[in-house]
Image (cartoon, rainbow, N blue to C red):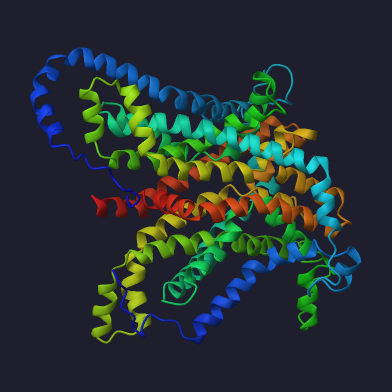
Amino acid sequence: MTRVTAAPASTDPGAAVTRGADAPRVTGRRRNTLRRQRLEILLFVTPALALMAIFVVYPVFSAARMSFYRWKGFGPMVDFVGLQNYLRVLADDVFTDAVVHNFTIVFASILVQLPLGLALALLLNRRIKARGLLRTIIFVPYVLAEVIAGVVWFQLLQPRTGLLERMLSSVGIPVPEQGFLGTPDLALATVFVVLTWKYLGLAVLLFLAGLQGVPDELHEAAQLDGASWWQVQRRIAVPLIAPTIRTWIFLSMIGSLQLFDMVWILTGGGPANATTTMATYLISQGTQRSNYGIAGAASVVLFLIGFAMAVAYQFLVLRRDTKADA
Amino acid sequence: MARRSTTYGRGGPFVYLVALAVVAVTLGPVLYGALGGFRTNAQLARDPAGFPDPWVLSNYTNVLGSASFWRYTMNSTVIAVITTAVAVLAGVMAAYPLARYQFKLREPLFMVFVLGLLFPAAVAIVPLFILVTRDLQLGNTWWGVALPQAAFALPVTVVILRPFLMALPKELEEAAMLDGASRVGIFWRIALPLSMPALVTVGVLAFVTSWNAYLLPLLLLQGDNRTLPLGVADYSTQYSADTAGVLAFTTIAMIPALMLFLAMQRRIVNGLQGAVKG
């Protein structure tokens, strides 16, 4: 870890001596200490574990249980239907489309945001003026609530009256009749553009932090050997920050699978279900139509997909990093 | 270490041009919102791009003068403060033995928190809604939103805090123990004050996450108990014709998060980078 701040060094040489003298006595009381220690640990971890058990673990299990019942949200859960909810969810085009949309965002993020973020980080890593200010500005969208960013973009993207369409048409670029968010073929891409605006700053920031850990001497040595700036970046800087890149990909994947807020604000999943995600599907099934069993099954599928991807990624990609560290 | 300046790593005109374009794209929408709030709707329809002419203050004064805006702000603040307090306190308490004690279940226990990172709130959201509103009778209350948010903030809090606590020097604690202080006393009087910088980092993260949260408040809060993001979203659908008013409301709602970010920038950045580097 790099965040260690001024460590108050123990300056009293006497302390060490006293400790040495006391050591045998401490071992003598070992059994008593152990029991006490167990109590202390329990005291320390109980609040956190209780909160997680009540608000994370229990609801997740309860979603899994719900998925085996037909339940409208009132009365006891008695109408056991086995895997029927799963069959219905998996046969529902809206849901399978939602899965496709989530994965489109997952891959588009990696294919677009990764090169873009890397390029910007490499540029900003040069000794240019106002670098700190630039970094702050790039990070601003990340700090805003998705809802707030979404509302502003919704206004920008208004068909005909919105600023963006006017700007495009004033330079002669044709705009779709229904607006970017109202055209089924363009809506998901438009949501992705807004998401990129919102989240690129995080990628740039993380990559920059990684790049700043690359020692200057490497650059200088490579430069002396006649390598061009581009060669240095490609052969030295980027490989060295590969662990950061892999971690970013992981975070981005998990985030894309959970996508909800921005879609809900910009399109509500429409037009014609062109932008539904697994999360918007389960929310509209659960809280709007009271199909709790269906929502439960969708939750479990979402969790399993996320979990499988996390485990696979851990094994295939991230494991290299932990091995290298050890 | 003084950085030697080489022509090599410096930016040429191209770099500055790209930087300028990035700044324009990044800040464009934010400025559009802020400036749009100073226009009338007629101005917005006529010329949404340039500077407002004349500058209209009424949109902003209307928002600042409305009782519901201040209620939303208070709700957001109280919920974020409770979330932060609970998450940081429970988080540092859990991280402390995970960092400082040797016991058999230490790593499995830590894995519980690491795995917690993988549980998105969306998965549990429907049962969570039922749990909070029916079983706990906390629907439409501050605590009903804050407690689940704190629980979901715990994994990242513990994962960031543990390595920090591990890196704290042990000498002070050992000396205090010889002086007869209990482990709990050491935790309060020594470990907590020493880990303040890390606590601020995770606190800011929890606060901003809660401040920006949408899904859980959307399901749990109605009427006067809504938070700012809900207020903004509802306002923009209810008064969709009043674009200038929506932009003014949105812009004002941005300000607290932006100010907190600017004040705490280094800590947020360090926290995120620390979390990624593990």
In the rendered structure, the answer to whether residue B235 lies left or right of residue B158 reads right
In the displayed structure, B72 sits above or below A191; it is above
In the displayed structure, A206 sits above or below B214; it is below
Whole-percent x and y of residue A127? 41, 76
Along the viewing direction, whichever of B44 and A304 lies nearer the viewer:
B44
Residue A145 appears in the figure:
yes
Whole-percent x and y of residue B158? 42, 37
Whole-percent x and y of residue A234? 36, 75
In the displayed structure, B118 sits above or below A249; it is above
Image quadrant where one finds the N terminus of chain B: bottom left
- Which residue lies most toward the top here? A32
Name the image quarter holding residue B177: top left
Q: Residue at x 36, y 63 (%)?
A: A242
Q: Residue at x 67, y 39 (%)?
A: B76
Number of marks drawn: 0
Residue A104 appears in the figure:
no
In the rendered structure, the answer to whether residue A155 lies left or right of residue B167 reads right
Along the viewing direction, whichever of B183 and A6 lies nearer the viewer:
A6
In the rendered structure, the answer to whether residue A35 lies left or right of residue B149 reads left
Name the image quarter holding residue A58: top right
Q: Residue at x 30, y 23 (%)?
A: B183
Name the image quarter holding residue B97: top left
Along the viewing direction, whichever of A37 and B85 lies nearer the viewer:
B85
In the displayed structure, B101 sits above or below A144; it is above
Whole-percent x and y of residue A312? 41, 49
In the rendered structure, the answer to whether residue B52 lies left or right of residue A50 reads right
